[in-house]
Each structure stands twice: as structure tokens, then as C-alpha cells.
Image: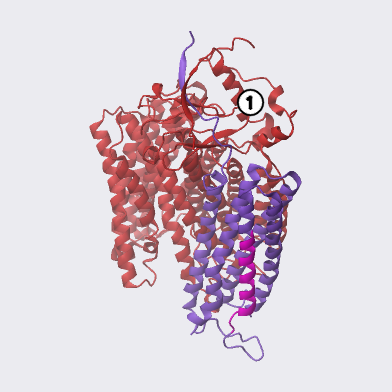
Amino acid sequence: MKRGELKEITVVPGLDANEHRALDLTWRRKPGLLGWLQTTNHKDIAIRYIVTAFIFFGLAGILAILMRLQLAFPENTFIGPDLYNQLFTVHGTTMMFLFAVPITEAFGIYFVPLMVGTRNVALPRLNAFGYYVYLAGGILLYAGLFLNIGPDTGWFSYVPLAGPQFSPGKRVDFWAQMITLTEIAGLTTAVEIIVTVFKQRAVGMSLNRIPLFVWAMVVTSFMVIFAMPSVMLASSYLAMDRLAHVNTHFFNPGEGGDALLYQHIFWFFGHPEVYIIFIPGTGFISTIVPTFARRRIFGYTAIVLALISTAFIGFGLWVHHMFATPVPELGQSFFTAASMIIAIPAGLQIFCWIATLWSGKPFLKTPLLWVGGFLSIFVFGGLSGIMLASVPIDLQVHDTFFVVAHFHYVLIGGMVFPLFGAIYYWFPKWTGRMLSESLGKWNFWLFFIGFNVTFFPMHQLGLKGMPRRVYTYATETGWGPLNLLATIGAGIIGLSVLIFLVNVLWSRKSGAMAGENPWGAATLEWATTSPPPSYNFLYLPTVRGRDALWDQPHISPVVAGVRSDIRQVLNTTMLEAAPDHLYEMAGDSVYPLLLAIPVCATVIVGIFTPWAFAIGAFLTFLAFIPWFWSGTEEAKQHKDKKYKRTLELEEPAPLPPTMEEPATK
Amino acid sequence: MNPTRSVIDVSELPRSALDHRSPIWIGNALLLAIETTMFAILAASYFYLRQNFEDWPPPQVNFIPPNLHPTPDLFWGTANLVVILAATFFMFLTDRAAVRFDKSKVLLWGSFTVVLGILAVAFRFREFHGTQFRWDDNAYASVVWGILLMHLIHLFVGISEDGFMFAYIMKYGMDDKHARDVRVTAVYWYWIGGIWLPLYAIIYFGPYWIGK
């Protein structure tokens, strides 16, 4: 079959300008609020996800500071037990479900299409739909909290505590349905990312040339696909057990149900979740390190294999969260071994990054500082993880602050530090301006110091026996001074995040101009303007090596012959990324929103009555009709020769300064 | 003299792909992976809950006289298995016709799938009845109803998708996009039929294999 033809074309003056105007007309979003609600551009959706997730991060951070204030002194009465339960539940739930997973997936939505050199994510309407559902889930959780009926059974909501007998009312249901909504969003995003990477890579970007961040997002997405259905089922069982007139008995021991079944299916999701959060973090690191070390990554193949093996092993350790339940001895040994084995691929990647930095010529900018913070803190958290993998130690410190310290070291170390590094790294691409380096250094050092001051003492508190999730403690325990220290640390972290916000708000308007590729990086997102135009690349790029922009980009051919008057993209083959066929993508549409409304309403009203599901299913069915009942632009043009795009009458976009006007207008 | 630029001209490439090279095909396959995981965990719950019962299924004591081994009604279950597989088979014929862009055959075989699908939904309600339990009787009943219900939802979705698609094709004819959509929906039906084989075996023969 003909795979496209290599040829030389003459660049007449104005060729690029005409192409730019045609593409912009096709790909930009419609003006006004309606255009904003209809957009399916991956960059618009990703920025929404990132901003929303960051707002949730801020809210959950405020909850954390409130908890720390309550624990600062023994026998403190600032916050009562009921509110305290809601605070730690909503804090943990937010950080896991509304912040960590959505924000890393959002980076994937923004950068995967750019890094693989295409114009939008595959299945763009699904992408828009996902955001609305995620937003509804977040609002649902906080509506509960602000009405003082927030969930109060911890972020994993174990039964029987969360069951109908011990948690009457609707608190736990807010949690359960929030899970359903956010996981729908997570799953749709995972599907889009995989399809984009499988089918829309730039010509020449064979599997062994995919940027490591993209690999990380693909591996994460596969983990999402096999992990998140599990938690949706766990929370749905729980909601059905709790819902009046349904009253199933999945977890009711009186009728043959089983509380441990909940723990198994929750942690079958919950442990992979840790890697769903951590693997994108490694993707950030693998992107930042070679750029600032000014050399190719050391051990590309080893890192990819490490990611994949992490994903596999990650599904085989969930029971280490359940060592305090009756697990057979052989099972304990198996899961201990698996928990220790997973340190091997993580360690392997760390050595690859160190080797890259060691043999490169590093220049120390803020993103690299965060990498340093990540390396030290994550390794430390990994070491306490090895301790916890051992059953006797685990039993000793189970449900104490030692565990709290451990998972904040791995999660903040493994995900938040790389994330801040990634924001400093990619902010110029989003806005066209650099973040301030000096504020960045303040941001980093205060965060690093504040983090250790907060969480290091918790190891000691845990060893001294302080249980997690207590709203206060007696003076005689002697836990007061270390708790006060931790509270001071939380304040320092808060200050650091405020400096970050100031940096973002100031730099957005007044930062130094960035240009296309301020860091001299190798991946394709730096081959277009900052911020990228609606259509991403004027001509779809081709690559001839792993580091696209370091491998002689000026002699790589570009792709011609993709239509610019409809949203057409080039699909390539899965392994070699050879040109395969052209494909018209779905355009902007209000249908995703119209579908999200009945879906969210069904899930939310389903807290109160099972009839919501019957009526909601019917409304969802109606919302699908227009979605299905639409053809492609190409078909419309084919049928109706007089058919004109509605945008054609509008003012064309201004030209970038590098382009010449066409000779004849 | 104007400068030149080397390009790969792809304008001659096909405008669509009807098979696994199409993005929507892969997207659909991934969504089915999600649903397969869902059923795998439902099935795992079925076996996990087994340990809490002396007999599987537990005796139905609300009946007079009590039924000590209330196995699900094999007749309706098997009848519906046949109907579901037949619907899947007609979807296979529809799929073949879509490859040939044969509009009339797509509509003919497709309508068989829809009619058989609706019959399967009707039979499914007999299957619920045939479990001899209500969902809220005990954990066994909850999980069996759960499996039957989740699969029923897929039957609904499969029928609706077919209905929309065939109506569109009837009105506007077969274009590339809708030929591909038929093929993708056919994959969905293969999955609906295929996944039901192990689930049917678990629900209807589980009580005999791990019953006592």
C-alpha cells in the first residue's frame, strides 16, 4: 500500500500564512461562553483540569492546616471530633481523587498530543465529557463538607464503619458517588491517551522513540483501565448496600456478606493507584533530567521496561494494606516479597537519572531543584516502605503516624515535587512567559524544609504509638512538642504554596518572554510557538530519532496533504508509526455537556432514591441521540456543495511574526 | 528563486479505516477492557462470598415448603444464552455486510440482531425471576443479580446503539464513518455474547460445581 510520497515542494511566499489561516479557522474554538462550553481542544480541557485540580489541592491543603492546628497542642478544642473526621476524610479523598490523578492525567492531555506531534487527542468529545463529570464529582464532595454532612469515614471508607448500620445519613454516599463520577473521568482520559499514542504519533516515532513522559502516561493509562473499575464496583456495592429500597448485602455479615471483600476490591484499586500517581511523576523527571543535564537520557530501554514492570508488579501487592487482617501466612510472604521487589524497577530508574545527571553538564534551574527534592524525599519514603513491607514492623506501626509519614514521603516526594518541577518546566509553553527563578527558589526551599519539618517528626510520633485519625491526645503522652513542630512545618508549606501562586499570577503577565524552546529541550512540544496555536503544528512533524529536536530537525521532512479545512489528522501504524490513513476528528460540540448533565444528575440523585437510575438512564439515552445523529464535516460538504463553514465570515487570526503575507490577498 | 522544502505527501492515503487501524476501534476495545475488568471483579466477588455460606446457593426459606437447593432456572438461562448468541451471530453477518457497504444486508441482518436483543432483554427478566431470590435476600442473591443486571445494561446499550445506527443508515445511506461504526458495534456485540459464556457458566453451573 502507498504510505505517502517523499518529495520536494517549492515554498511560494504566503504559503505558510495561508495554511495558518485555514488551520486556525478550522481548529479554533468559537467565540463567547457557548464556544467555551463546546470546545474539545485538548489544551483548553487540560488547562481546565489543571486549574480545577489545583483549586482542590488548595482546599485540601487548607483542611490539612486546620487539622495541624487542632493537633498542635494536646487536648486542644479548636475542632471537635465530628468535624475532624470530615476534615481528614475530605483531605485524603481530595488529594487522591480530585488532585493527584486528574492533574497528572491533565498534563497527559495537554502534552501527549504535542509530544507525539498531532493536532488533538483522539476521541476529543469524550475528553470534554470527562471534565464535566470530574467537576461534578468534586463539587458534590465539597457540597457535603460545606453543609457539615461531609463523609467522615476516611478516604478508603471501610465497612462496617461506612455501612448502613454505623454510618446512617447520606455522608458516605457523597463519598461513594464522588468516586463513581471521578473514576468515569479518569477512565475516559486513560482511553483517549492510549488511543492518541497508538494511532496519532508523528511519522517515524516508532515505539522505541516515544518520549519517556508519553510512555509513562501510556503505562499509567493501562493501570487506570484495570484498576479503576475495581473501586467503582467497591463504591457501587457500598452505595447499593446503603440505599433504602435496594439494600443489597455485599458487605453485610448477617446475610453472608463480607467486610474483607470490600478491603480486597478497594485495595486492588488502591495499591495500583499509588503507581498511577507515581508513574507520571517519573515521566516528569525523565523529561526534565535530560534537558537540564544536556545529554540524552541514560538507559531509555531500561526505564521503559521498569515502567512496565512496575505496572505489572503494582497489581500484585494490594494485600500489604491488609496485613492486620487474617491473611494466610503464605499470602503474607507472597505480598511481602512483591512489595520488596517493586523497589527494584523504582531503584533502577533512579540510578538512570543519577547517571544522566552525572555524565551530563547540568545547569541548575528551578525544575532541576525540584528533581533533587524528589530524589531525596522519594528515596527516603521508599526506604520506610521497605520497612512497612515486613509484616512484623507493619503490625507494630499499623494505623499510626508512621504510616502517615511514609505515604506523604512517597506521594508528595514521588508526585508533588515532580509536579512542581513540571510546572516550572512547562509554564513557558502554556503562557509564553517564564516563571520567576528567584521566587521559584524560595518556593522550592520553603517547600522542601517545610515538608521535612512537617512529616519527619511523624515517623517518631508513630513509633511512640500515636494513632492516625485521632482529633486530640492527652498531655501525658508527650506527643505535644513533635506535633507542634509538624504544625509549624505545615505553615511553612502553606507559605511556600502562596509564593508559588504569587509567582504564577505575576509571571503570567510580567514574566520574561520564553520563545519556542527556552530550555533547549528535545521533545516536539517545543517545536511550536508558546503558547501553541489551536492546531498545534503548522505542518505535522516527522522524527528521525528518540530526541526529536536534537536529531537534526531542520532536515526532517514535514507532512503535507492533510486537509486544513476540516479537522483531519494523520493516523500512523501502531509499531513503526508509518503513515496509514487520514481521519476526520469530531469537532467542537455542546453534546458532551448535554450528556454530562443527565449522567451526573443520575449519580447524584441516586444518593436518595433508586428511581434516579431508571429515569436517569432514559434521559441519558435521550442525550445520546444528537451525539449519534451527526455525520462528519467531510460528508456534509460532500452532500451539499453550497455548505459553508459558519466561521468563514469571521476575522482571520493575526499572523505570527515569522510568516510572510501572501502575495495576492 | 523560491526555496524548497522536503515533505511527505499523504494526500493519497485512504480517508478512513474500517478495522483495528481506526482510533475508534481501539477506543472501543479499551472500553471493553474496562467492562471486562468490571465483570472479572464481579465474578471474583461471587467466589469470595461463597466461603460465607454452608450451601451455595443458600436455602430459600421464604418458600413454603422451603427450597433447600434453589439453583437458578437452567431453562430460561440457557434459552437466553441461545438468543444472545444468535443476536451476536446476526451482528457478525451485519459486520460482513458493512465491509461490502451492502446497505440492505446491513439493515436486514442488523434488524435481526435488534429483535433478538429485545427478546434477550425480555428473557433476562425471566432469568431474574428464575434465581428464586430477591436481590436483598442475601449476599449470594446480591451478587447474582449484580452480574445479571450489569450484563442487561450492556444488552440495552447494544440494542440502542444498533437502533440509532441503523436508523441513520436507513435515512442517509452508508458512508465510511457509519460502515466503521457498524463494525465497531459488531465488536461490542461479540464481546456481549462472548463475556456471557463464562458468566452464564458461573451463574448456572456454579451451584453444581461449588455448591456443597
Residue A616 appears anywhere in the view: yes
* Residue beneath disc 1: A25
Q: Is residue A142 above or below residue A540?
A: below
Instruction: From this view, report whether residue A511 is shown above or below residue A407.
Output: above
Image side of residue B99 versus residue A292, left or right: right
Q: Specify the farthest residue to the left.
A: A359
- Of A515 and B209, the residue lying toward us: B209
Would residue B81 be counted in the magenta stretch?
A: yes
- Please say whether residue A96 is one of the residues in the magenta stretch: no
Image: A310 above or below A467: above
Residue placed most toward the observer, A648 or A475: A648
| Percent x, y of residue A471 | 46, 57
Residue A269 on image: x %, y %: 46, 58
| Figure colour scheme | by chain
Q: Amino acid at mark 1?
A: Leu
Give the quarter of the figure containing the C terminus of chain A. top right
The part of the image, by quadrant, that contains residue B110 is bottom right
Return the x and y of residue A189 as percentages of the image width and height.
53, 46
Q: Chain of mark 1?
A: A
Q: Residue at x 38, y 51 (%)?
A: A483
Farthest residue, direction top: B1
Q: Drawn colour of chain B?
A: purple
Which of the chains is red?
A
- Mark count: 1
Taking the image as shown, residue A477 lies to the left or right of residue A115, namely: left
Q: Nearer the viewer, residue A62 or A297?
A: A297
| Residue at (76% x, 46% y) in the render | B171
Whether residue A61 is visible here, answered yes or no, is no
Which residues, given as a range, are shown in magenta?
Answer: B70-90
Task: Work out whether residue B148 or residue A204 is closer to the camera in this orientation and state it.
Answer: A204
